[in-house]
Image (spheres, rainbow, N blue to C red):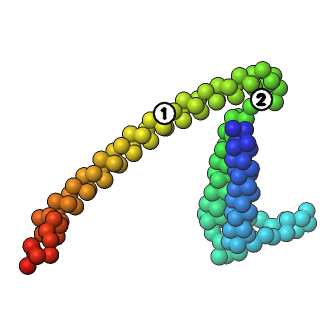
Amino acid sequence: MSSDLLTDLQRQLRDLNDNFASVVEQLVHIAPPMPVGPDDVQPLSALPAAVSRAELQTKATELSQSLMQRFRDIDSLIDKLPELGEPPEEQDARIAGMLQDHQALRKELGVVMGEAEYKLDEVYGCYEALSNHVLAHEGKMGRGVSDAQ
């Protein structure tokens, strides 16, 4: 289970990186970077005329919200990881409990699958009966060649 969580965590971190790069690229496109050294600090009003302050604020807000959601998702996954200092006995007990849950779910799935297969067989039987009825009604089944003439 931990490996699934680690995989999800890796995926979330990759998505966070991709998301950050994408939004920064969008921000650079609408408002190209400007030098901001101590001697050449330019006010926000020095943005190119094509970029509205509202558009820049909207993009920055989207970036902030998106990044915060990614961090919340990552924190949620981290919280699900087992504690590092957990004694082996507790790990074994937790694993045994998960195995019991797995077996119970597997058994339940087997029952549900059996019921589904039974219902599917019933549907096939109904379809076969309907098909035979339609074919017999239209004279295409149950008669020989001499009967049809």
Name the amino acid, label 2. Glu
Q: Distance between the residues labelled 1 and 2?
A: 30 Å
Would you identify the image quadrant in which residue 143 lies?
Answer: bottom left
* Disc 1 versus disc 2: nearer the observer: 1
Q: Residues within 10 Å of mark 1 (few under 14, many from 20)?
A: few
On the rendered structure, is 43 left or right of 55? right
Percent across and percent down for residue 27 are 70, 66
Percent across and percent down for residue 8 are 69, 47
State the mark number for residue 83: 2
Regarding mark 1 in the picture, which secondary structure is present there?
Answer: helix
Q: Which residue is drawn at 74% across and 25% down?
A: 92
Q: In this view, does 97 lie above or below 134?
A: above
**Camera-side residue of 84 and 25:** 84
State the mark number for residue 108: 1
Say how many tags the image has: 2
Residue lying farthest to the top in this orientation:
89
Tell me which numbered mark, 1 or 2, is placed earlier along the sequence.
2
On the rendered structure, is 133 left or right of 10? left
Q: Is residue 16 above or below residue 27?
A: above
Quadrant holding the C terminus:
bottom left
Percent across and percent down for residue 31 are 71, 70
Q: Is residue 3 visible?
A: yes
Q: Is residue 68 visible?
A: no
Q: Residue at x 67, y 43 (%)?
A: 72
Quadrant holding the N terminus:
top right
Q: Residue at x 64, y 62 (%)?
A: 59
Percent across and percent down for residue 107 are 51, 33
**Camera-side residue of 101 and 120:** 120
Q: Is residue 86 above or below residue 7?
A: above
Would you identify the image quadrant in which residue 39 lies?
Answer: bottom right
